[in-house]
Amino acid sequence: MRRDWYPLIAGVLAVVVAEFVLILWTTSGHFTYTLDDPYIHLALAENLARFGHYGLNLEDYSSPSSSILWPLLLVPFLTLGAGLYAPLIVNTPCAIATVLVIHQLIVECAASDAKHGTKVPCVWALLIFFAANGFGLIFTGMEHSLQVLVTVSVLYLLIRMQLATDSGKELPSYNHYLLVLFVVLSPLVRFEGLAISAFAIAMLIRFRKPRLAIFSAGLIALSLVSYFHAMLALGLPWLPSSVLVKSAAAADVIAQTSITGKIAGAAARAAKRSGRELGNSRGRAALGYPCGFTTSSARRDHAQRRAREECQDAAIDRPQVLGRDGEERILRGGLG
């Protein structure tokens, strides 16, 4: 490990510990996140860890998470007994890595200018991270710290390629592989990351790296199609309910795609045959979405209202998953 990284790591840890202590002091010793969404992810991850069930309630399937990877990342930490602190354990290393990448980006940009030296005070990276509310994101308990790390890494590697092109040098091949990795991870962490991935693929084409661009796009397509297929196999919409509710564009795409409508109808019929009643409010929220979108605008609005009820039910019914004992287990840090 490089010696100039030690102050950065110590600085991030000092702020995280200070915020953690302040939270405990403010809440009389009860740790809590600044948002309620992490508890939905924790409930989903707990069911995956204990029962291999994808959903908030064991009676049916649901896809409440806006991230493909985040609940899966929490599963091993819940299995090991991290409980409520699992998101914090994941977010803290992500924050440290982000600060290190920002610092390295500043150093390399300064080194590319002959008028400036390569010595850059560590405080600049910490100040940039603080100004971007990076420390606040850690305690949301969400996947945003990981999203920031992936995005900053993509930009850093692209800037390295640009600096190498300007100087007539060729970067080692591992830089290209790292870029492909982060480009593929970006939409898997959050669907909005597709914009970053599209930009990176366009830059690879500009840098005359068409094979890397095609390879990255192919891996992204394969990953997303696999996820969509898994959701449809469970009788769920191919996008998470939270994404469908917040994105009118996604609703329009589903409404205008006849193939998707047929697949959704087949999934709904399969759910009927398995004994799941579409008249149930949760069944309509999960399966009524793709079916309703393929008809009229009024039925789309009805499906959206049902999806909102699904999200509200997820928040209300969370104790059904965790129960009183389950909530205490998460607070204590175990799955029991």
Image (spheres, rainbow, N blue to C red):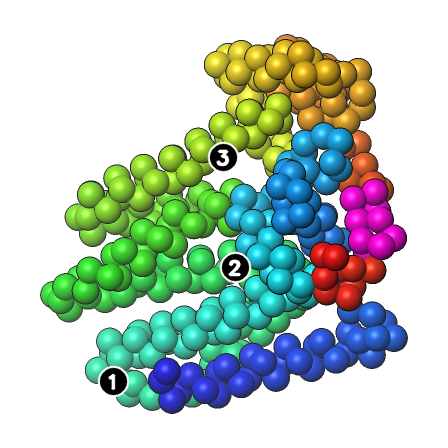
Q: Mark 1 or mark 3, which is nearer to you?
A: 3
| Residue name at image x 87 percent, y 75 percent | 28
Badge 2: residue crowd in 10 Å (few <14, some 14–19, many ≥20)? many
Q: Tell me which residue sits at (24%, 61%) in the image.
A: 174
The location of residue 213, given as percent across then percent down, is: 26, 44
Secondary structure mostly taken by the magenta-highlighted segment of the chain? helix
Q: Which of the two discs, 2 and 3, sits closer to the camera?
A: 3
Q: CA distance from mark 2 to mark 1?
A: 35 Å
Which numbered marker is on residue 227? 3
Q: Is residue 116 at all visible to an observer of this figure?
A: yes
Residue 115 position (above or below residue 191) = below
Q: Is residue 183 left or right of residue 301?
A: left
Residue at the disc numbered 2: 146
Residue with the mark numbered 1:
115
Q: Residue at x 32, y 56 (%)?
A: 179
Dot 3 amino acid type: Tyr
> Distance from label 1 to label 3 (Cα)?
50 Å
- Label located before the other in sequence (1 or 3): 1
Q: Quadrant of the N terminus?
A: bottom left
